[in-house]
Image (spheres, rainbow, N blue to C red):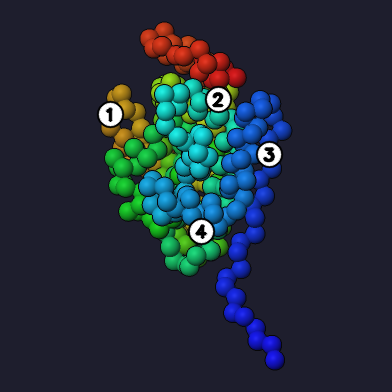
Amino acid sequence: MSTKRPTGPKPPEPLHIPLSTHDLNDEQRRVERELAEILANRTVADRLYNALPEALGGRVINIDLYRDLHPEYSRDGTDRRERRTRLTPATYGPAKIASKDRFLRSLAHGQGQVVLIMGGGPASGKSTSLRATLGNPQDLADIVYDTSLASSSEALAFVASSLEAGHTVKIAWVDRPFPRAIDSMVARACVDGRYLTLERMATLHRGSRQAILDVAEAYRSDERVEIAGIDNRYEERKPALRDLDPLVTAVRSSLKGVTHDAARAAFDAYRRSHDVPPDVERALRG
């Protein structure tokens, strides 16, 4: 007589992470492949990610935390800045795919949760601005997706998926003047090694501005979606909340100034008063 053994929950399917087709050197390709292998096992990746203090057990989902799951990228040492400058291009693709996958999977865990989606171009000071105006992200929502929200199609899909799963949505979008965001990104790159090329900064800041315009148009009358604008101009004043209509007006008027030429001009101005390591400059200029 045969007896059936009890079975536990079926492990999640491996996450498919295609490797880059753009130009990476041998070291970068190795690190990209290794991080993709770590993140492909969703069970292992979730456990490693949840153990990161900043992840708060997985409630806060952030692409840059997923980069740190590669031990070579995240470890300390005297060469940390130089190493991370070299390896930043290798970690972006796998981390982006894994963070998006984790967010969408988190929506299936129950109903009636509050989902906070953060937005604004890279180096806009999203976390700092949010804490200064609305409070700690983890106190505002059950699920926090810390992202640039740099694609209209993805932004609309994130909101729609959250609502379809039975949740309410808060969007906190940070408006940072583009030249000041360039300053912040370069300063961070010179210390920590994590960077974006100047061209990519322009692309993502334009995309994020267009995304918040499209999300506001689609959901401004939906009571399940709350959109908070945050004006972040550290030099002039502390971050402050901005009503939706003034935010839309300001974002629309700023779009024309978010260009690769503007990014280069801001970087050149920064270099006149700050030292930038040669490898960082080469990386930023692409």
Sequence order check, earlier mark of 2 and 3: 3
As measured in the structure, the alpha-carbon distance from the residue carrying label 2 to the one carrying label 1 is: 35 Å
Task: Check the picture and name the quadrant holding the N terminus.
Answer: bottom right
Packing grade of label 1 (10 A; few <14, some 14-19, many >=20) is: few
> Label 1, on which residue?
237
Q: Find the residue positioned furthest to the top.
A: 272
> Mark 3 to mark 4: distance in Å?
24 Å
In the picture, measured across the screen, residue 1 lies left or right of residue 200, that is right
Name the quadrant of the C terminus.
top right
In what element is the residue under mark 1? Answer: loop
Q: Going from the N terminus, do you reach mark 1 or mark 3 first?
A: 3
Q: Nearer the viewer, residue 169 or 28?
A: 28
Give the answer, above or below, for where 204 lies relative to 187: below
Q: Earlier in the sequence, mark 3 or mark 4?
A: 3
Among the two numbered marks 2 and 1 on one chain, the one whose residue lies closer to the N terminus? 2
Disc 2 residue type (three-letter): Arg
Q: Nearer the viewer, mark 1 or mark 3?
A: 3
Residue 98 or residue 205, whichever sits in front = 98
Q: How far apart are marks 4 and 1 (CA)?
A: 36 Å
Q: Name the residue under label 3.
A: 19
